[in-house]
Image: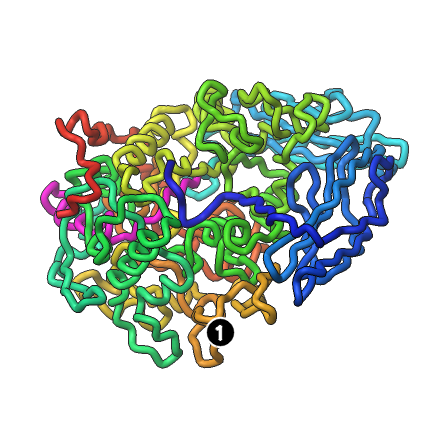
Amino acid sequence: MKTFCCSVLALVIAPASALASVNVTSPANGATVGSPVQYVATATAPACAKGVATMGIYVDNVKVYVGKGASLNYELTVSPGAHQTKVEEWDYCKSGSTEHINITVTGSTSGPTVSISASPGSITAGKSSLLTVTAANDTGLTVAGTDGSSYTLAAAGGTITVTPSATTTYTAQATGTSGTASSSATVTVSTSGGGTPGTPSQINHVIFMLQENHTFDNYFGMLNPYRITNGWTKGDDGNTYIVDGIDDKLTKSDEDDEGTSIKLFKLKSTCIDDDSSDWLASYGDVNRYNFLTTRPIQMTGFVHTAEGFAKNCASTGACSGNFTDLHGTRAMGYYDQGFLNYYYYMASQFAVSNRWFSPVASKSVPNRIATFTGGTTQGLVLDPGGNDKLAQLAIPTIFNALDKAGVSWKIYYTDTQGYCLDDDVCGTAGNDRYPATAFSNLTYSFNYLRVNASKKASGCTAPLEPSSVVGDSTNSFCINPNKIAPLSHYYSDLTNGTLPSFAFIETGYGANDEHPGSGNSVLIGQLEVAKVVNAFMASPEWNDSVFFFSYDEGGGPYDHVPPVPGHSNDFTSADVGVVPDIAGIAVNPDSYEPCLPPDGVPTTHCDLHSDFPGVHPNDAPAVHGFDAQLGFRLPNIVISPFTRRHYVSNIPLDHTAILKFVETRFIGTNYLTPHVAAQPSLLDFFDFNGVPWATPPSPPAPVTSESLGYNPCTAATLQ
């Protein structure tokens, strides 16, 4: 099984020292308590000279709190029911000790809460919308529409299918022993197009999918000659559009540590050894270990980084893969339509951006977190779970904002923590069937997905349901399938007209995500994406939706465009046209900057290592924060009936531009962060009057080993 540079959510427990101890004075083991629960504990580590470093609280095997020092006094909100909790200490000698505290939490005496959302929020006359209502601490629940309709639901909530003939606002009211609460959602009804013709309001569904770890040049560097050969360079407006690729820059080369020059070359293998793309590697790729604000921009560190990563993994065995390419040659390899025929066709028919970046100069998990939060990790540059061993992060997300506005959303997962989906292939470990989603790194996910320690249906409190509803017969977790669901629900939602306003499709971690790995063929990922996109184009939802497709971060392969403000056009040919510098979107999302923890132990806001860029006062990220350098350019396609034909945009953006598009369309302009506000509107991609792809194209079947007549997954044969 493949091992990644990143993890979705890692729960790590250090081995216990024989002399270390934890003393919990509140709550008592076996106690029945109300929520919030007051945890009071102290710890000792006599065998470690520096003593206790941090203490943490787990609830049902999920780390929910970490604090520094040898004592904690923390008030924790816990849902009603029986819970297995524990308090753990970690000392500076990397040992630990644990005390288990089993508690039963009584029902809340606080007032009722209720929320309602409509999916879709805009329909044409005669179509239906699905109302989803969730409530807590209530004894009764009703829904009333301004059209005179009324419904009664169970106290925990449920769903209602409505078919209003005119725009209707539905108000859900929950009644409890301590008062009432209400929430409203509006279903807008129009006679044509689900919105005002000729405007973005015609888009009622936004789908966003990110695969793993490829740069623009690595995948789409040869897209320009492909478009020219097929006569697909001219848009409907008569203008010729040029892709800023590497086809005219094939003499570009880089050197390994021995001084051997490695030029750009076409890859013969669809699976190559992994590269590195973490914070240190990303800055090193731009300019080898020169992190100063006065640094020249050379883009000459890719081979060096890949070489160092391979040699380290080969010597330590810390990573999977053959690592036959110890000189980092693979970093200069690229693909073309020979292997990526589906992607090349779709990118040429629809629209592509010359300047689509990831928001953070680091690897997958930080970028996926930043994608959900509007560009912030609140100071972290590494994977908070896998690298830093931190608890979930309390950062507001796009999902918080959508819930508050009563706008429907759903995350579709394609894999689990155990790299499986079905009972017959899943293992027996506790997290094997747990959905693999980067959302789990954030505390807000606990409202929709959590471990079920009892493995009984009764262990899940509405609106959460036991995981048997998504095919897990062990009921090992609780889930709200209206918010988080396996990819099979995506296909049924497309067919049934129940696609939410915002849908995020998680990559198939380790299975079909295209992440570089000596046994992981990019063809498998392309085939999976084709299935997802083709189903969308053939569905009733095609008429009023947009599908944004890209990759979470660059992963380490070469790209010639520096993701550095003031320098993003240093190596761009004048033939491409007017290309704004990325300085306009390089806006820090908040006041958090990368920082070095005083004692070397990562905190919720600091996790730099002593050799990382940002440690020294003249380093670029120390001066400019996270937006001293964005993540690298990424392959991308914008797919919709409204997408302009053969269009290539030169307007810089990163993943958070999708959040701006979603917020503008469904919520308003009170954006999550200043970083989101700085992103472009994306309206240049669309023609809402002409509707160029009212009838979608018929793409070719993706290349496979069978269609090629041989298996191109040969990591040892790159060129």
Image side of residue 232 versus residue 693, left or right: left
Residue 626 is situated, as x and y percent measured from the top left of the image, at: 47, 66
Q: Residue at x 39, y 30 (%)?
A: 542
- Colour convention of the picture: rainbow
Residue 372 is situated, as x and y percent measured from the top left of the image, at: 52, 48
Helix, strand or loop under label 1: loop
Residue 516 is situated, as x and y percent measured from the top left of the image, at: 31, 45
Q: How many marks?
A: 1
The residue where tag 1 is placed is 615
Q: Residue at x 69, y 53 (%)?
A: 89
Name the amino acid type tagged 1.
Val
In which quarter of the view is residue 691 placed? top left
Residue 394 is situated, as x and y percent measured from the top left of the image, at: 64, 52
**Residue extent of the magenta highlight:** 207-232
- The answer to whether one can see residue 203 in this image is no
In which quarter of the view is residue 184 placed? top right
Q: Residues within 10 Å of mark 1 (few under 14, many from 20)?
A: some
Image quarter of the N terminus: top left
Picture layout, residue 242 above or below residue 432: below
In which quarter of the view is residue 331 placed? bottom left
Q: Residue at x 40, y 43 (%)?
A: 3
Q: In the image shown, does 137 or 659 lie closer to the viewer?
A: 137
